[in-house]
Amino acid sequence: MPLPRLKIGYLTANDPHDRRSWSGTHYYMARALQQYCGDVVPLGPIAPNGEFLHKAVRKGLRLLFGQNYLYSHTSSFARQQAAIAERRLTLHPCDIIFAPSAAGQLAYLKTSLPVVYVSDATFNQVLNYYPEFSNVLAVSRRGGEEIERAAISRADLLIYPSSWAAASARNFYGANAGKVHVVPFGANVDDLPTIDMLFNRPASDVCRLLFVGVDWVKKGGELAYETCRVLNDRGIPASLTIVGCTPPKTIIHPRVTVVPFLDKNSPSQRRALSELYVNADFFILPTRAECYGLVYCEANAFGLPAIGTDTGGVSEIVRNGENGYLLPVGAGGGDYAAAIAELYADSERYRMLREQSRAAFDTRLNWRAWGTAVSGLLNRLVA
């Protein structure tokens, strides 16, 4: 007789049905859990009363002291979130708590259920790494560390998408190595093109670069533009399509196209984004800071070699010579242009890189692989 399916309480401050939440990860992660692990019971979104006041205080402190106040990383706010989650658990009984990117909701949660904490980085790693976590008030630093440490200690199982993040949990926060696991996240895409569609398209006489990012500065947009410009200056016809943000007005070039925003909740706009991936030759994201980098996975889903930066957890996705190349943080546009030009000029090497990029997605950078691995971890935990 088959065992009953697990009831998985999906704990998050966000709406897991929104494809934009956590760059779409909540939506695809919850769907993978439902398909491979058990029945998902959404416990979010969680928005304590007075959040508007917290945001006003943050703005005021920023104006007064020129520093960031992380109200979501205070014990009072975290305790409010935990109380809401506890009330919802009484209405929706579960077998296990699954808490992705939910340190604040998890840190003070009172429950006897097994708890799984999932994150792409620890608080210590993002502190002074991401702009929004830089120049923060001392109270926010203390609060962030307290909440992260409490969440890690509270969890029975810790799952990270990269060895970079997992190492911080073990080495900085003292997490028991036996409960720390690395399982890469998958690409947040639907309606994948077939292999024939990807690899039997006609050749282009222009090297088409695709940049997808919501933050022009943090994602290295200036470097992507410089790469395109240098390629053209060196006699290699190249174009750049920028998706997800609006670059400064100084970014002007006849071969640069800007698509400011595409909403993944809209089927037609998801298809438009897919077409951009299908028609590109390289995905370029010279990111300045990145905990993981799901867009590199998405590029590989379309057989698109990813050219990016060796920072954070990106190297868990992109392996040099297999599905793309990572350059040092200090590399300039000329360095990116040289790497792309060398690959583009060698048609056989480029063809193999494209095939290997899609294979990387098919084998390890998809939600089926993630769901299968996590299913085994969850069943061992509840057993």
Image (spheres, grey):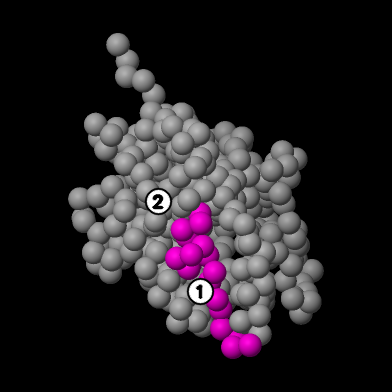
| Towards the viewer: 314 or 102 | 102
**Residue 260 location, x and y as percent?**
75, 60
For residue 280, the mark is none
Inspect the image, locate mark 2, and give the three-letter code of the amino acid beneath it: Leu
Between the C-alphas of marks 1 and 2, the distance is 24 Å
Inspect the image, locate mark 1, and give the three-letter code of the amino acid beneath it: Phe
Q: Residue at x 32, y 41 (%)?
A: 112
**Residue 70 location, x and y as percent?**
53, 71
Closer to the chain start, of discs 1 and 2, is 2
For residue 133, the mark is 1
Residue occupied by mark 2: 109
Q: Residue at x 30, y 47 (%)?
A: 157
| Towards the viewer: 188 or 171 | 171
Q: Residue at x 43, y 71 (%)?
A: 143
Secondary structure of the magenta portion, mostly? Answer: helix
| Towards the viewer: 362 or 51 | 51
**Residue 97 location, x and y as percent?**
39, 41
